Amino acid sequence: MSVMDTTSNFLKTIIQEDIDSGKTAKVVTRFPPEPNGYLHIGHAKSICVNFGLANEFGGECNLRFDDTNPEKESIEYVESIKRDIEWLGFEWAGEARYASNYFGQLYDWAIHLVKEGKAYVCELSADEAREYRGTLTEPGKNSPYRDRSVEESLTLLEKMKAGEMADGSASLRAKIDMASGNINLRDPVLYRIRHVTHHNTGDDWSIYPSYDFAHGQEDAIEGITHSICTLEFADHKPLYDWLLENLPVPSKPVQYEFARLNPNYSITSKRKLKMLVDEAVVEGWDDPRMPTISGLRRRGYTPTALRRFCDMTGVSRANSQVDLAMLEFAIRDELDKSAPRSMCVLRPLKVVLTNYPEDKSEIMRGPFHPQNEAMGSREMPFSREIWIEQEDFREEANKKYKRLVIGKRVRLRNAYIIEADEAIKDADGNIIEVRARVIENTVGNDPEDGIRAKGVIHWVDTATAVACSVKLYDRLFLTENPGAGDTDLMDQINPESLVELSNCYAEASLASAEVGQGYQFERQGYFCRDEASGSDLVFNQTIGLRDGQGKSFA
RNA sequence: UGGGGUGUCGCCAAGCGGUAAGGCAACGGGUUUUGAUCCCGUCAUGCGGAGGUUCGAUCCCUCCCACCCCAGCCA
């Protein structure tokens, strides 16, 4: 099945119109992350939108690091971002770009604005500037430095650049309109002084451009035709346009905004995600419970499923909260088709088949996929003692329970039908073993006596099973919109988001399970080998199988 | 009380004046050696509300309501 989105959206409509009218010869978009954290599912959406649009319309998409704030940025993040984009399956045009590569050009343009009388060096402190800015309902007032001479601003700007002025002692501001209803137009800061080492330019600069002064100009330098960002930047568009109109830029990109992706029961704030990492609530940025791309990867999500999910959720300008069930559908749907089947007992209960000779063993054969013969089959040794799931046995039960019950029959997946005779208990009354009998000639056949099995359960031969650990995951947060209002995120952590089972038994073929491959443990779900566990056999649960309503029995 | 946005099924989302796509979820039923998959079926006389224009309005106009974003020398 194709992962292409067949539904229309407003961005596609705009681009198609621009192509039809001849306004756009070749679509050029860009994905502009700030390297101050790991990418999360919301970024995956933006990546799919930007690269997807470029691909669909035969254009290209640049990767550009918006590294204008050295205090929060690092090379570690740059590398993780590149890795995640490549893993998602997208290829950026040429080399990765950096806002910091344009610092020289940006500075020249700053001088241009000053010379044109459209920018000035302001020496108001941050606090004073806030007072002068006014409020949402009241206009601001002009800075006392607003009308200083071009020469004076030029001299000060050079001093700022030369590192001769202290952090916060001055800033370069655009001269627009302190009374504008749009606060972004009240003489926005273009450059601020920061004596900080930059991950890319080292100590070359002691002033750094603001987002507003950098972004549109970078787009123009790169010939971006459609600059796509999220809704909160809509207020910045008039400033984006003002700068492009007042600077001798090589092209005129246009900004479009769309609503960011917000899955429920999740957070997509780099700040909050970093807090979970710093507070050790999770193992790290790639903890399988994290909505980060690296976490989802370790959890067993695939690039295809993530892209499918992004396409399914559409692109619009309406704030929304997407049901995580859609993400779960995307990965289940893919894994159902691609994952080889296998059996693994999570909470083992021994079953002794009393009528099966102790020295006998057979090789059972099971398909890797019930609907796809081309995937082949695997062998499963079978002998007198096997492990089954504790929850698959009851001494007695109602008709809804389609598993092993004393006096009743159940089918062992890909093997015999067995009938339970007796439960062996320890001194505390816990069932520690079940005695059962194999029904003759039932491998691949129904019983000759016509008494059919109630259901099918999975099993593993005790002699050849491989011990392993399995990590079961549930949503990290208990609430649908974690941290909403003024609630504390930390109070909403799901204490059962991770359940680690260390006494599991997998069928022998799973001993060589490979990282990156999704497996179905029949009747349980999809699992993948944990990439962070080295040679130990540890499986992460990607997602459980869908529960039919019949699964609820009392 | 300023500026910018958005409101179509429980959750997403098409629709651009001609009589409400699709997906997820849910609910029935069938197949099944995974209570999985798969298959069939059900699920908005209604498009935030009220007026208006029109032969005809989710689409145009007016007013109202609700929600989101903006007062970092963050992005």
Image: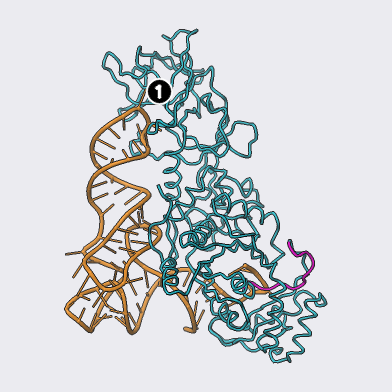
Chain colours: A cyan, B orange
Residue extending farthest to the right is A164
Seen at 57% across and 34% down, the residue is A514
Question: Does the magenta-highlighted stretch encompass residue A302?
Answer: no
Question: Does the magenta-highlighted stretch encompass residue A203?
Answer: yes
Q: Nearer the viewer, residue A149 or A460?
A: A149
Work out which quarter of the rendered image holds the C terminus of chain A and state it: top left
Residue A197, percent from left and from top: 77, 64
For the record, the magenta segment spans A200-211
Q: Which image quadrant is residue A495 in?
A: top right
Q: Nearer the viewer, residue A11 or B66?
A: A11
Reading the image, the residue beneath label 1 is: A414
Q: Amino acid at mark 1?
A: Asn
Locate residue A267 relative to residue A76 in the image: left or right.
Answer: left
Give the vertical position of A410 relative to A492 (above or below).
above
Pointer 1 indicates a residue of which chain?
A: A
Kindly report the secondary structure that dominates the magenta region of the rendered protein.
loop
